[in-house]
Amino acid sequence: MRRIIHCLLIGACIVLEAREDKEPVIEAGLAQLDITPEEPIFLAGYAARRKPSEGVDIPLKAQALALRSGNQRFVFVALDNCEVSRRFMEPVLKKLAATHGLPRGSVMVVSSHTHSAPVLADTLEVMAIMPAKDKEVIRRYSKRLQSQLAEVVSLALKDLSPAQLKHGVGEATFAMNRRIYRPEGIRFGENPDGPVDWDVPVLSILSTQGELRGILFGYACHGTSVSGNGFFQVSGDYMAYARASLENVYPGAMAIFMTGMGADQNPSPRGDIMDAKRHGVELAGAVIEVLNKPMRSVEGRLAHTYKEMDLHLEAAPDRPQLEKDAKSDDIYVRRRAEQFLAILNQGGAMPLSIPLPMSIVRIGTDLTFMNLAGEVVVDYAIRLKRQYADDHPWCIGYAYEVPCYIPNVRILKEGGYEAESSLIYYGLYGPFRTSIESNILTQVKGLMQTLETPSDALP
């Protein structure tokens, strides 16, 4: 009898080990830091602002959600800022690679895209016009923020513990397509017939005892509830108000916002801080409704894959065109031209493409995060959700870095801000080639196919 029991126990251990090898336990770690500026500072997002901030409306945060299963790790970082550039992120990623062995692509900073957070160094430089003393404030804040981003990732990794994950999708209806059609071309406004993405994806992070530790939620809409005219308060816009409302309802849980692909979406109505508060309440309510209903369990191996593709631009202007632009009445056109004339004068060449980071993060077959850098227009989310519906897609934009707007072929053909004039502020000459959409979708398909490989074989 003892021998039989001994054999049964060995058999049970073998089965248990095989099961653990097949589906390792998901671990989650959470952390956050206050990144509110400590002194008056220029705010990013609106070119019309020409003086520093005059106070704080609601504090800004950097938050991290680290996930681990087996030898796979991935960290989502939510940042209350308009955006980050490649040059800004480079020292942060190098430090994390050296400290934690995290390869490129495994740490994803997602900017909330609030238009009431500080200007950052090496980011939207054409738009950033200010006195030298204010540039020094930007430099100090940026250096501090880079350290905080590395720190919040480290803290989240230290917080890793076994977790239960659950997923659901709600709806909020304040996002409005902002591209309206006029005889003279595309203009900003409210287009109730334009494409939108009103989904509110939600991921609850619970302890193994069922205690709610964190709430990951998203929405595809610009952080422009507050206009740039006369508002000089530091603010996280509707995203920060939604987060605060959720943390008030669920004490002890950390609410983390992930920006969707809503580069051509504005909040409606918009204009002042009360609009931000109203939209925040609506978004939080959508999340609470999801949390109050049965949610799908998310189980299985964590797997992720990363790639950078080249987005090709149309032919660059020649020197005569640059010299003409350098005399433009538009200060931003002048600043862009001056940058490229400096490059040519130093023997350099005009860029013919820009790199676009992208990644796929999957948890078993229950949830798939599809992540694109840049200000990604809503058509991509609509297409990806339809094409990969069986994979439970969650579309995230403003991921890793923001090189510029990412239009699709429809918007390129129509023209307007997202296709053309926005490139001025990003210091680029375009537009992109119309192959941009098919090329991006092809690369996403390739990344999805890569994740059909067992996760232990992934880098």
Image (cartoon, helix red, strand yellow):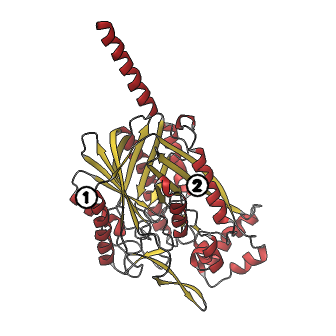
Q: Amino acid at mark 1?
A: Asn
Query: Which quadrant is the C terminus positioned in?
Result: top right
Label 2 packing within 10 angstroms: few (<14), some (14-19), many (20+): many
Q: Is residue 208 above or below residue 204?
A: above
- Mark linked to residue 357: 2
CA neighbours of label 1 inside 10 A, class few (<14), some (14 to 19), many (20+): few
Task: Mark 2 or mark 1: name the one nearer the start of the chain.
Answer: 1
Q: CA distance from mark 2 to mark 1?
A: 35 Å
Residue 184 x/y as whole percent: 61, 91
Q: Tell me: residue 236, above or below residue 149.
A: below
The quadrant of the picture occupied by the N terminus is top left
User: Residue 112's x, y, as percent?
Assistant: 42, 63
Q: Nearer the viewer, residue 204 or 237?
A: 204
Secondary structure beneath dot 2 equals: strand
Residue 292 got which mark? 1
Q: Residue 238: x, y in percent?
A: 34, 69
Disc 2 residue type?
Pro
Which residue corresponds to the image point at 44% horizontal and 76% vertical from the top-left? 266
Left/right placement of residue 439 relative to residue 248 reads right
